[in-house]
């Protein structure tokens, strides 16, 4: 029988940020938080509520009301029916709703964030939340091949500096949890946008092309921070047999790796062929 833990606390009390040490103490690898199913700090299913533009749609995303999102998570959960899971929510009612939508029918062991954090830690977390910052308990970027190690290090440095240092007021003290275990974002429904810079997206796409040796090169990327799920790519294409199969493989790779490596679920991808040879 699957063990289910419900971590509960008001918004801005450091639940997601503190989840690393909590799951370690429980021996749990699987986390459900803000619309995502996360295993070992990697997103395996779902869509982050932080990408929604409005608070209402973000709430619906976090509760798994969307059928496609719900089925995707249910399918992953069914692959390991006895694996323990930690569900993060702002109240008992929210965790129970998530269990209802995801068809999780096991008893819930309730955990209070106050039992795992100090008053000072919660106060600091609330200070960050008041400035519009949220935490997601996933690794900033996860590249699987050694050939991408240099780019991975550059991306982590560039994104974390942009998110965590440049945009935070100088009077805010730094949080102590290891940066590689979480991602700090300003969500779309908050004061700003997810700060995945268009240059980062361009480097991500170029890395995909060079890693698989696709018969085309990238000439231009159109990526708008206001609409992070929409991506337009301009290509220079080498006319080879089965070009359509390469294109379909490329689109699938962008969708899959965009979610796991950048945390962006690219849903509307358009490819333009600028030239061919």
Image (spheres, rainbow, N blue to C red):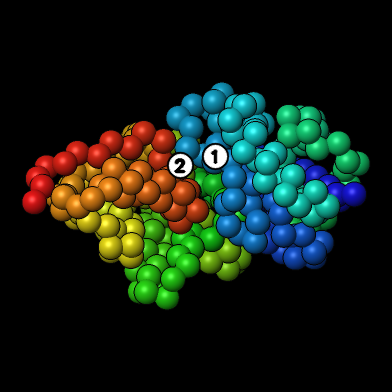
At a point 80% along the width and 45% down the height, the residue shown is 6
Question: In the picture, residue 103 is in which quadrant?
Answer: top right
Is residue 167 placed above or below 62 in the rendered structure?
below
Q: Is residue 52 left or right of residue 213?
A: right
**Could you tell me residue 96's position as x and y percent?**
80, 33
Is residue 137 placed above or below 221 in the rendered structure?
below
Q: Is residue 235 visible?
A: yes
**Which residue position is annotated with label 1?**
47
Q: Is residue 54 left or right of residue 177?
A: left
Q: Are marks 2 and 1 in contact (CB under 8 Å)?
A: yes
- For disc 1, the neighbor class at 10 Å (few under 14, some 14 to 19, many from 20) is many
Q: Is residue 160 left or right of residue 60?
A: left
- For disc 2, the neighbor class at 10 Å (few under 14, some 14 to 19, many from 20) is many
**Which residue position is annotated with label 2?**
265
Spatial CA span between label 2 and label 1: 7 Å
At a point 80% along the width and 64% down the height, the residue shown is 27
Is residue 169 placed above or below 89 in the rendered structure?
below
């Amino acid at each position: 029988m699957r063990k289910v833990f419900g971590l509960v606390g008001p918004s801005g009390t450091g639940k997601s940020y503190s989840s690393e040490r909590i799951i370690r103490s429980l021996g749990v690898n699987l986390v459900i938080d803000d619309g995502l199913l996360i295993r070992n700090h990697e997103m395996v299913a779902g869509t982050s509520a932080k990408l929604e533009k409005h608070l209402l749609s973000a709430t619906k995303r976090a509760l798994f009301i969307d059928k496609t999102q719900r089925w995707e998570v249910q399918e992953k959960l069914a692959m390991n029916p006895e694996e323990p899971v930690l569900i993060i929510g702002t109240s008992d009612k929210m965790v129970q709703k998530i269990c209802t939508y995801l068809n999780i029918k096991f008893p819930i062991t309730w955990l209070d964030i106050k039992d795992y954090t100090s008053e000072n830690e919660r106060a600091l977390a609330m200070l960050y939340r008041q400035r519009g910052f949220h935490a997601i308990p996933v690794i900033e970027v996860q590249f699987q091949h050694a050939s991408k190690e240099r780019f991975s290090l550059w991306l982590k440095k560039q994104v974390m500096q942009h998110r965590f240092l440049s945009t935070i007021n100088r009077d805010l003290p730094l949080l102590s949890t290891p940066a590689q275990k979480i991602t700090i974002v300003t969500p779309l429904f908050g004061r700003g946008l997810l700060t995945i810079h268009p240059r980062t997206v361009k480097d991500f796409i170029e890395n995909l092309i060079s890693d698989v040796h696709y018969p085309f090169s990238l000439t231009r990327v159109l990526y708008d921070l206001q609409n992070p799920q929409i991506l337009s790519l301009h290509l220079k294409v080498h006319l080879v047999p089965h070009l359509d199969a390469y294109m379909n493989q490329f689109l699938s790779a962008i969708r899959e790796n965009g979610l796991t490596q950048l945390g962006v679920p690219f849903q509307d991808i358009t490819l333009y062929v600028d030239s061919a040879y």
